[in-house]
Image (tube, helix red, strand yellow):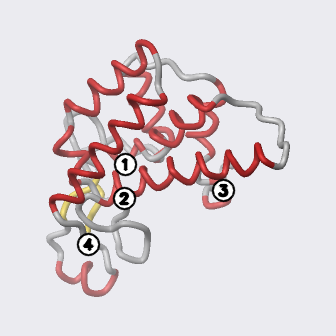
Amino acid sequence: KLEAEQIMHNWEMFLGYIEEYITGERKDQLLSFYKQYEDRFQMMPAAHKPQYHNCFPGGYIDHVNRVIQLSLEINEVWKKFGVKDTYTTEELVFSAINHDLGKFGDFEHPSCLDNDNEWEIKNRGEVYKFNDALQYMTVPDRGIWLLTQLGIKMSTNEMLAIKLHDGLYDPTN
């Protein structure tokens, strides 16, 4: 569980990554979108049950920050060993920032709600439940859909990184 100060620190760090690594109109578009829904993003969990990562208020931004940090660190290791890069640092960070964006929901509805079913919480461990008001989409597809609805352009590398980030966990990959 995160304290309010840590949630705010994580949020500022998250916005700082956009400021530092994203350029041009996309930076302004991302900042505008994320700030418009600041309260929702700050309190979102990253998962619906504790067996998965960051199933707590503030868990989403904490998770995304870690993905960004690790992506940058792994990138440095690859460079050190001479791996030929086929992407830019901006593409890497943009993809990390938005890889789980589909967990946001849509512009009217969050994807995750507090679960009011005690049996599901106790027996299934589902602290949060999926919001049935949403059209069903996979997390990567919803993230790409949201970015296109916002008019935020993506490179092919970025689109594929978001689409395929679940790797082996998604049988369509």
- Are dots 1 and 2 in contact, CB under 8 Å? yes
* Residue toward you, 124 or 47: 47
Task: Measure the C-alpha gap from mark 4 to mark 1.
Answer: 15 Å
Q: Earlier in the sequence, mark 1 or mark 3?
A: 1
Task: Measure the C-alpha gap from mark 3 to mark 2.
Answer: 21 Å
Task: Measure the C-alpha gap from mark 1 to mark 3.
Answer: 19 Å
Q: Earlier in the sequence, mark 4 or mark 2?
A: 2
Query: In the shown orientation, is residue 93 left or right of residue 87?
Result: left
* Residue toward you, 87 or 48: 87
**Circle 4 or circle 3, nearest the eye:** 4
Name the kind of residue labelled 4 in the image: Val
Task: Measure the C-alpha gap from mark 4 to mark 2.
Answer: 12 Å
Task: Say which element carries label 1.
Answer: helix
Would you name the residue on which mark 1 appears?
103
Task: Measure the C-alpha gap from mark 1 to mark 2.
Answer: 8 Å
- Binning the other alpha carbons within 10 Å of mark 1 as few (below 14), some (14 to 19) or many (20 upward) gives many
Task: Say which element carries label 2.
Answer: loop
Which quadrant of the figure has residue 90?
top right
Name the kind of residue labelled 3 in the image: Pro
Query: In the shown orientation, is residue 135 left or right of residue 88?
Result: left
> Residue 127 at what x, y percent from top left?
26, 72
Would you name the residue on which mark 3 appears?
171
Would you name the residue on which mark 2 appears?
46
Which quadrant of the figure has residue 119?
bottom left
**Circle 1 or circle 3, nearest the eye:** 1
Which quadrant of the figure has residue 120?
bottom left
Would you name the residue on which mark 4 appears?
127
> Residue 153 at what x, y percent from top left?
50, 18
